[in-house]
Structures are given as structure tokens and as C-alpha cells.
Amino acid sequence: MQTLQRFCCLLYYWGITLAIHRDSPPFANHKDLYNTIDATLLGDVAWQSFSLEYSGEKPAGDCPLWMQQSYDVWFWDPHAIVRNMLANSDYTGEMDYTPYHEFQEKDKKHHYKDFMSGDWAWHQSDEIAQDPQTHGAAFIPIILGSNKTMVSVATGQNDYYPLYLLIGNVHNNVRHAHRHALALVGFMAIPKTSKKGMNDPTFRKFKKQMFHSSLSKIFTNLKPGMTTPEVMWCGDGHYCRVIYGLGPYIADYEEQVVLAGIIKNWCGRCLAFPTSLDDGGVSQSCEHTDALVDLPFTNDFPHANIYQLLAPDLLHQLIKGTFKDHLVEWCFPQGHRFSQWTGDDLKVLMKVYLSAIKGHTISVRLNISLPRQHSLVHYEILVRLFGTPNGLCSSITKSKHIKAVKKPWRRSSKHKALSQMLLTNQRLDKIAAARVDFQNHSNFANDDIDNNDNNHEEQQHKETNPFAMEADDYNDVEDDGVVDDEDIIADVKLARSARHYDCAFINIDDKQDGILSMDIVRIFCFLSFTFTNGHMYPCALIQWFPRIAEERDELTGMWMVAPSFNEDGSHDLLIIHIDSITCGTHLLPIFSTQFVPQGLQFHHSLDAYQGFYVNHFIDHHAFELVS
């Protein structure tokens, strides 16, 4: 309601400014705006639905309520969604129509990055090329993802089951940039029963059957295009023959259990026993599942095997599963006075974890038979098949929950909210499609009306600050923690009162590779001077941090450096040209077996410690430079 009031107020004041020009706003009121959006044909895909109900044998007498109910599944035609994605000119230059293999020039190692660089897309295209009917068609991998989410702890329906879709041709950076590369497909039904009935084998089987039947029904329209090529208009302005294929499925472990039709604590990719997962086992197969349980939905589509298509999940398997739930709780049982670990806390801790625990005696367990940890055994083959795991992480779908589920729910009246959420998502997709069309027809003076100011400021920052870095891919993942205004104010005050000197890589030898071509320095200030020729030279006053050894530390894999001093104990300073600075770097103190002294502030660490690790885990840029 507050949003409507603000919108009406904006129209009112807008009308006043236009009145002197004998003009009026484009919309009379919010209803006029909604009617205009609803009448827009761009990005218009109508919602469809079907109902499912239990058809098995019902007990005599008191029949459970879930056996009597009908369950509605709402969805958009995935064929129309894929057509709109392919035609989106916003992805021009950031979409691969053919698979490729990329090798590093210096050592000929296979370099995996985006999805189409993986072996799975390559093999699928080989099969397409061998069939005379499909030869020459571009392969379009259909990547799916689903994850339950809760919108409220109040009574009534407070959880939803959204289903998402993206195509593997789009680059990973586009998926993380929230440019509609991940699309909402529909809302799956959630059958419910009493707490006592949750463990009823009949109920659990019904849930799995309904899940797989729903997926099979939703993607029926794509099935013809998996064997017969279709001609599609693409965003680069050309027509293209395409062939579809079911790709990886993004899901956490609980959902992988349902997808693969396995028992909890088993692996979805191999037949290793739950009591000894580390011993490994042969790969799962559809034939094995056919003999035990009902068929998965992938059996209804050509060239699809759910056991090969379970995607790696960095968020739940590595960040939360392995790191937070085990390593952090193991080494920091009290959480260092953290009442709750947030996603940002964990991401920062991961980058400094090795150096923090080195030198401390920690018990070692050789056998950890847990599914999430065991899944890491399969990561090498999964990277080779699907490219880098960040392109298939459930953090993408969780981040989409905010826009597709949580915000539309908050805007609803909370009474029969789903129908209102469907309409909100339909309008948002139309606005997004219209925005791209307006840009193509030069209706906007700027490239990006929403982010132009922010992008301009960011570009200025990058031009003036040699230490500007790109944001982490996982910054937009929903976190459990809350940051309040007091924290922000405290940080601002600290930043104003404490001296903060950045460290950086500087280039010293173009003939060497990696860190051997660079030195580490601490920058005390930036300055400039004008020479006799009238040219101004921008410079920096630095202190050297030479390497302690010519090899990495054996345990952490990090290079080690130490500050350089003159014979009288003063800092070894030098003035260098700013062009020699490559980028910023992060130095971690070598703590050894000692704990951090009480009262030591982070901005004193470069003076308090005598040796430091060059932390190449801090971001992608540092990792590439040091490697």
C-alpha cells in the first residue's frame, strides 16, 4: 500500500511540473499503469496449470486428507521461455552457440570455464552431428533448478516450491548478474500431512511420484525439439537451427535424494555404501533404479540420465556442508562469540582459514562418511563435464527467490497470495522484455536507466583507484544475518580514525610468470611531481615486502613475504610510478602457534607481525596472478 501511495504522489507532482507545458503524465493512476503493462505483448507468456491427486488404493475408514485433496501446479510454457531467452539481444556476445575446448598456451592444459567449455556439451553435440536429421543444429542445454523457500513463520501457506530454468549457452557471469538468464518456470505443489504421517511410506512415495510427474508434464512441449531441429530467432540478429536437451539439475542434497530416487545418506552419483562413502563405488545407472523404484522424469526425454545430470552445489556441499557445518564447528565450536554465522562471515573466513589454523594441534579424522563431503570426490569429473561449478550453484536459485517469490509475496494481500505472485512475476518479465526492446530502438539515452549512475560512479572509481576489484559472485546470496545501522556507523567512524595502507602487486619483470614477475609492496601515500619537461608523474611511496623463500609454504600453498627495513630500523621506502602497480593484494599475518593479542586492531597487523602470507584465495584476480 505504501508503494501505491508513493506512486500516486509521484504522478501528482509529475503532473504539476507538466501542467505548465500543457502536458500530463503518461499514466492517470496505478491502475492505468498496470493495464498498460498487462497489454504489453513483449515477454508475454501465459500461465498454465494442471491438477494432480492420489490415485492409489485408499484405506477403509479414516482416509488421510492428503489422499483426498487435489494439488495444482502452475507453470509457464518452457518452450516460450527458451524462445525469449534466445531472442534476447542483451546476451549478445555473452552466449556460446557451439561447444568449445580451450587450452592454455604455455602448458597446453585444458581450461574449463563456462558451461559450453565442458565435455558434456561437447559429447552431446557430437551425437547431434552424427544424426543426419539434426546435423548442423546448435545444441541448447536446458538447465533446471528447484528449491523450497519459506516466506514467513506465520500461519497459513508460508512455503513455496519454485522451479527455475536457464540455458547452458549463456556465460556464467550473466547468470550471476541477475539479467533474467535464470527464469521462473512455475510453482510445484507441496503435499502436506500431519507430523505423524510424514514418515508414512505411501505418502513419501506419492510426493516423489508427484514431483517427477509434474516435471515430465511441464517440459512436454520441449520434447519434440529434442529430436527434430527448430528454427529460432537469436539475439544476434540471425536465425538458427537448434536442438534441445535436458542438462544438469541444480538442487541441494535433500532434493537430489528425490530426483535420483535414492535413500537418504546414499550418494546420487555412485553406489558407495552410506557407512563407507569414502571407499567409493560404481556409478549409478537408470537400469539399477528401474529395478528398485519408479522411473525418474528424465526417462521420458531422450539422451537424459538424472545420475549424470546432478549438478555440483558449492553452496550446500562445500560452503555450508563441508566448511560451515564441520570445519568451522570443529575448530571454532563457540563461533568466536558469533551468535549466527552469515554467508558473508563464512566467505571471509574461508579466505583466511588455512593461515589461521596452521600451527595449532587439531585432531584428524581419516574417514568422514557424509554425503555432502563425499560429493566433493566427484567434483573433478563434474568440472570436466559442466565447466566451473559456480555456474551451477544453488546460490543462483536462492538469490532468485528474493525477486520471484519473497518480494511478490510481500506485495500481496497474503490471502491466496499465489495468484497475486503469478501476476507480479508476469508483469516483471514484461517490463524486463520491454526494457531490452526500448534499448534496441534507442529509446534510452543511456545504456542502462537503472544502473547508469551507479555504473558511472563505479567506472570513475576503477579509473582513479588501482585497487578496485570486481565483486564476489556470491554477494547476492541470501544470508541469515542482519546488518543494522549501528554497524555501518561504527565502520565509518573507524575508517575515518584509523590509518589504512593498502598492499599491492607491482610488476618488475615481464619475462617471468606468476608471482616471480612481481613484488609485494605496502603503499603509504600517492603523490605526483612535475619534471623539468613539464610532464606530471603520478607516483606512490611504498615499502618493499620481499619474499622470505623461493618456494610456497608447504602446508598452506601460499608465498611468504616480510617487510624490509634499513639498518637503522626505519622503513625501506621507495617512490615508484603508479603504472607499475598491477592490483591490490591481501597479506595475512603468519600467526604460528600464537593467538591474536587482546586489543590488536586489524589496521595494526602490518606493523605488529614480522611475516605474512600472500593470500591468493582472496579473489579470482589474485589467484590467477599468483598461479
Image (spheres, helix red, strand yellow):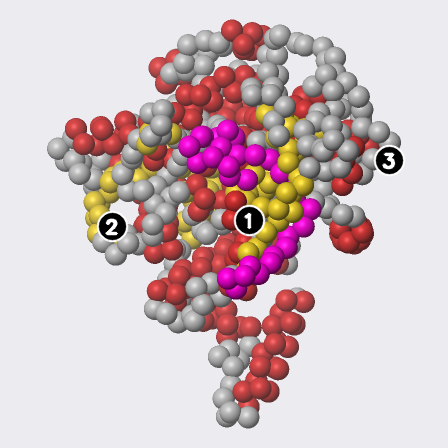
Q: Is residue 478 left or right of residue 50?
A: right
* Observer able to see residue 138: yes
Asked which quadrant contains residue 482, the reply is: top right
Q: Amino acid at mark 1?
A: His
Task: Identify the residue shown where x is 58% and y is 46%.
Answer: 576
Disc 1/disc 2 C-alpha distance (Å): 53 Å
Which residue has dot 2 on it?
A: 232
In the image, residue 46 lies at what x, y percent? 40, 55
147 is higher (above) or lower (below) than 231? above
Q: Which residues are magenta?
A: 506-534
Q: Is residue 515 magenta?
A: yes
472 is higher (above) or lower (below) than 23? above
Q: Is residue 245 magenta?
A: no
Which residue has dot 3 on it?
A: 599
Regarding mark 2 in the picture, which secondary structure is present there? strand
Bin the neighbour count of mark 3 within 10 Å (Cα to Cα): few under 14, some 14-19, many 20 and up: few
Task: Give whichever of discs 3 and 2 has the lower sequence position.
Answer: 2
Task: Identify the residue shown where x is 42% and y is 10%.
Answer: 282
127 is higher (above) or lower (below) than 214? above
The N terminus - image quarter? bottom right
Q: Amino acid at mark 2?
A: Met
Task: Give whichever of discs 1 and 2 has the lower sequence position.
Answer: 2
Q: Amino acid at mark 3?
A: Gly
* Observer able to see residue 302: no
Callout 1 touching callout 2 (CB < 8 Å): no
User: Considering depth in this image, is 198 or 385 the residue closer to the camera?
Assistant: 385
In the image, residue 130 lies at what x, y percent? 16, 28
Bin the neighbour count of mark 2 within 10 Å (Cα to Cα): few under 14, some 14-19, many 20 and up: some
In the image, residue 325 lies at what x, y percent? 67, 25
Which residue has dot 1 on it?
A: 577
User: Considering depth in this image, is 24 or 262 the residue closer to the camera?
Assistant: 24
